[in-house]
């Protein structure tokens, strides 16, 4: 697939500047960089819906052009101040400056980053009404907005519209759509998009692999999880702690404790740092198979790493000792956990008390 410049469709159609005049940050006169910094600071301080933003433009020393407005919209979007971004956009239109593809795409991104998927779709409608052509960036921003809003069907509709219009699909768009499908429960569609992404030689991110791996936890699809993890390794993509955690969770749910423990061992060999989720998942595996020595070893590593245990940590570690018939060890773990400030849940204490009571009851005699 040819990879053309994604910004090409959004290039400004403004007339070139007069001879000798610089276009610093899209301002009309020389020295605009300083004025742009001043305007950025004023917009950052301004409050939405108070008239302060419009006043800042009226009091500006120079008249901004489309590029300057777009930069300020982007600034608001990064701060997740979508209402301010919309105000800058409205001031731009009042000034008679036509927003271009980049401006619309930036505003859509600002709305999407703030969780305003409906507003992002509305801005897209404004864009079409103004006969401004969307490009790859536009659709990626829209699909990402739908992802955050959990609007799976809308995201798929946009993807179909994008491909029908022969707009190039990029890695960002694929990744956002895969995540949307995963969150929407469309696992097979997500895998289909991954295959398409790989066929088109796009680099798949660790985040995308992890998203798909996590979808295998609830479905219990062990084979697919292993396939994804191997593909991640073979692609040269960085294998992260969350990715390992997802694979461990898949094995744990399936009762494949030895395989989960193997992943944990390989993590340590590869210097992939375990986190609280890793330790709790492994302790849960040890609890299921009564591997009390392994549980105590994992807890020791957890302490050495400075990872603070939780009630789930205590429950799994105590449970492993109980299941392994090591009631004294279970009592010791419980006491040490409480001493370190861990809130022990009632269920764990009751499980230990019942196990101790059962061990104290003599068996029946015959004779």
Image (cartoon, rainbow, N blue to C red):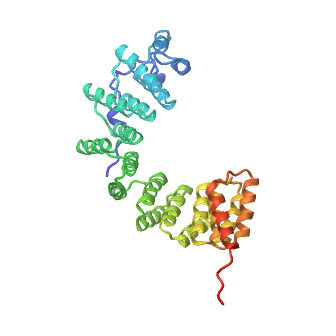
Residue furthest top in the image: 59
Q: Is residue 261 above or below residue 312?
A: below
Q: Is residue 261 left or right of residue 251?
A: right
Q: Is residue 88 left or right of residue 287?
A: left
Which quarter of the figure is the C terminus placed in? Answer: bottom right
Q: Is residue 354 above or below residue 240?
A: below
Residue furthest left in the image: 164
Q: Quadrant of residue 168?
A: top left
Residue drawn at (51%, 71%) of the image: 256
Residue furthest bottom in the image: 367
Residue drawn at (48%, 19%) of the image: 48
Depth check: give the residue in front, 166 or 322: 322
Residue drawn at (54%, 59%) of the image: 245
Q: Is residue 329 above or below residue 56?
A: below
Q: Position of residue 343 (x, y in %)?
A: 68, 51
Q: How many marks?
A: 0
Q: Is residue 357 above or below residue 21?
A: below
Asked if residue 232 can be seen in this view, the reply is yes
Q: Position of residue 90 (x, y in %)?
A: 38, 18
Q: Is residue 10 left or right of residue 246?
A: left
Residue drawn at (68%, 59%) of the image: 302
Depth check: give the residue in front, 49 or 207: 49
Asked if residue 5 can be seen in this view, the reply is no
């Amino acid at each position: 697939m040819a990879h053309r410049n994604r910004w090409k469709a959004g290039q400004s159609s403004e007339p070139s500047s007069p001879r000798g005049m610089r276009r610093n940050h899209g301002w009309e006169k020389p020295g605009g960089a300083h004025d742009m910094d001043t305007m950025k600071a004023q917009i950052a301080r301004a409050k939405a819906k108070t008239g302060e933003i419009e006043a800042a433009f009226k009091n500006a020393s120079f008249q901004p052009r489309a590029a300057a407005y777009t930069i300020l919209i982007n600034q608001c979007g990064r701060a997740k101040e979508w209402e301010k971004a919309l105000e800058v956009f409205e001031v731009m239109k009042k000034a008679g400056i036509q927003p271009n593809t980049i401006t619309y795409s930036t505003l859509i991104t600002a709305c999407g980053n703030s969780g305003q998927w409906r507003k992002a779709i509305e801005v897209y409608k404004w864009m079409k009404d103004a006969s401004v052509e969307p490009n790859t960036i536009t659709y990626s921003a829209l699909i990402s907005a739908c992802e955050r809003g959990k609007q799976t069907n809308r995201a798929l509709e946009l993807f179909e519209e994008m491909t029908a219009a022969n707009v190039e699909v990029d890695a960002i768009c694929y990744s956002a759509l895969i995540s949307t499908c995963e969150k929407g429960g469309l696992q097979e569609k997500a895998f289909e998009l991954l295959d398409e992404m790989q066929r088109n030689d796009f680099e798949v991110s660790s985040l995308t692999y992890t998203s798909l791996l996590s979808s295998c936890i609830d479905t219990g699809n062990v084979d697919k999880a292993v396939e994804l993890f191997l593909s991640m390794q073979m692609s040269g993509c960085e294998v992260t702690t969350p990715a390992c955690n997802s694979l461990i969770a898949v094995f744990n749910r399936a009762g494949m404790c030895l395989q989960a423990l193997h992943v944990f061992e390989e993590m340590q060999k590869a210097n992939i740092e375990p986190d609280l989720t890793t330790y709790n998942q492994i302790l849960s595996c040890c609890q299921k198979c009564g591997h009390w020595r392994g549980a105590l070893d994992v807890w020791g590593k957890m302490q050495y790493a400075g990872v603070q245990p939780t009630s789930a940590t205590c429950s799994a570690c105590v449970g492993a000792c109980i299941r392994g018939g090591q009631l004294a060890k279970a009592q010791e773990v419980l006491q040490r956990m409480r001493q370190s400030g861990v809130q022990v849940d009632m269920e764990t204490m009751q499980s230990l008390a019942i196990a101790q009571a059962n061990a104290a009851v003599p068996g029946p005699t015959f004779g």
